[in-house]
Image: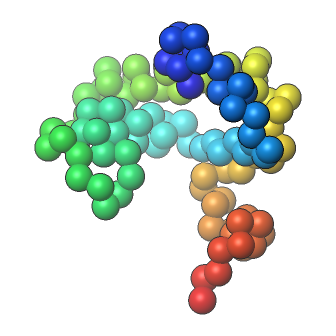
Amino acid sequence: MMELESRGFNVLDLNFDHVIYLYRKNKIDQAVSFAKALKTGQWVSGVKGNGEAKTVAHYEISEALSNILKMQDVYEEKYKSVVCDEYCYEDFSDQKILKYFSVSLA
């Protein structure tokens, strides 16, 4: 989101009806995942990345964590007021959340 803003794009101009904030409690795990995705180009499982090794150096994790914390600050300052619901990634399998999105486990 910060990159979009740096290019003069405001996501709020899209006038979404409902804005949801998904976050992770474990910022270290998030930083490792973020660093791997940045390095490999693989943002979701099942999608082939660029072939780079998934091993990340400590400095890459540190940079990713720094970016995550900056993005969290931007969220708190600019976007929290328009968010309707917040969900934790680690709790995403909770039945209540799945029901909200009309997802069936059957």
Q: Is 71 on the left or on the right of 82, as rendered?
A: left
Q: Position of residue 92 (x, y in %)?
A: 64, 60
Residue 30 vertical placement versus 97 (above, below): above
Residue at 58%, 11% in the rendered image = 8
The answer to whether residue 24 of the structure is visible from this angle is yes
Residue at 60%, 44% in the rendered image = 24
Q: Position of residue 97 (x, y in %)?
A: 73, 64
- Quarter of the image with the C terminus is bottom right
Residue 17 vertical placement versus 5 (above, below): below
Q: Is 47 on the left or on the right of 71, as rendered?
A: left
The answer to which image quadrant residue 93 occupies is bottom right
User: Which residue is more in the foreground, 13 or 69?
Assistant: 13
Q: Position of residue 67 (x, y in %)?
A: 49, 21
User: Which residue is more in the foreground, 53 or 28?
Assistant: 53
Residue 5 vertical placement versus 96 (above, below): above
Q: Position of residue 68 (x, y in %)?
A: 53, 27
- Quarter of the image with the N terminus is top right
Residue at 64%, 81% in the rendered image = 104
Q: Is 40 on the left or on the right of 96, as rendered?
A: left
The answer to whether residue 69 of the structure is visible from this angle is no
